Image: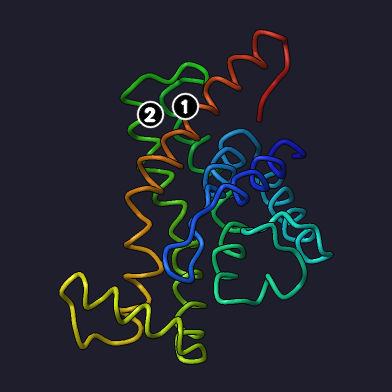
Amino acid sequence: MSFSIVAMAIGSWISFYVGPIPYTFQNLGVVLTGLLLPPRYSFSAIGLYLLLIAIGMPIAAGFRGGIHVLYGYTAGYLWGFLLSAPLLSLVSRRYLKAVGKSLGDIDRKNVAILLALVSIAMIPTYILGVAVLYIYIFKLPTLYRWAEAISLYIGIPNISPIAMSFIVGMLVFLPQDIFMDHLIAILVAREIYRYLYRRGIAVG
């Protein structure tokens, strides 16, 4: 579990801002957690990560820590991790069992299917992230103006705040999430599994 927490912390530190919303590589750590740990342990790892943030450790985006991080306008994503990691753990293990493979044996086809399963498992994170962002769009004028500007830029003016939240809270991040964070995490998880297997260490 400690590896998962370190991976998520490092992923959160590697960040850049898309307007007021930080884009991080936390998803990479979450996907690694879900692929390498059983469901209950992946849930516990994310829970411990959130607890460490709550008590002030600077392991959230922008080297932030403290309870306020867990109820800010990006907090929905953090709480969503708590659901997505064990869900990914469950569906990935069922898939690998069905095809008779271990994580270390996956080929390109398996990687593609796992990539789809990761995207499905991350849905709770996107839903909670967008939902919390939607609430804060009305409270923070700067956030609202930025979301409105993005909507106008992509040619969708006069849309509802919920649609606006969906665009700026999910769609703008989705390509990089899938083709960088998620794909890299699957490939890294495969190599970690192989490394541990060669040393006689069971995974998951």
Left or right: residue 88 compared with residue 119: right
| Residue at the far right in the pictured view | 55
Q: Which residue is nearer to you in this view: 64 or 128?
A: 64
Residue at 55 percent across and 70 percent down: it is 74
Q: Is residue 34 above or below residue 78?
A: above
Q: Which residue is mark 1?
A: 187
Q: Residue furthest left?
A: 155
Image height check: is 15 above or below 97?
A: below
Image disc number at residue 111:
2
Q: Quadrant of the N terminus?
A: top right
* Residue type for callout 1: Leu
- Residue at the top extreme, as displayed: 198
How many residues crowd around disc 2 within 10 Å: few (fewer than 14), some, or many (20 or more)?
Answer: some
Give yes or no for contact between labels 2 and 1 (Cβ–Cβ under 8 Å). yes
Left or right, 195 with respect to 77, comes to right
- In-image side of 130 versus 46 (left or right): left
Q: Which is nearer the eye, 180 or 122?
A: 180
**Which of the marked residues, 2 or 1, is nearer the chain's N terminus?**
2
Distance from disc 2 to disc 1, alpha carbons, whole Å, reads 8 Å
Q: Amino acid at mark 2?
A: Val
Q: Image point 40% across, 43% down: which residue? A: 117
Residue at the (51%, 91%) spot, across then down = 139
In percent of width and height, residue 113 lies at 34, 35
Residue 38 tag number: none
* Closer mark to the observer between disc 2 and disc 1: 1
Instruction: Tell me residue 120's x, y (percent).
Output: 40, 51
Indicate the quadrant containing the C terminus: top left, top right, bottom left or bottom right: top right
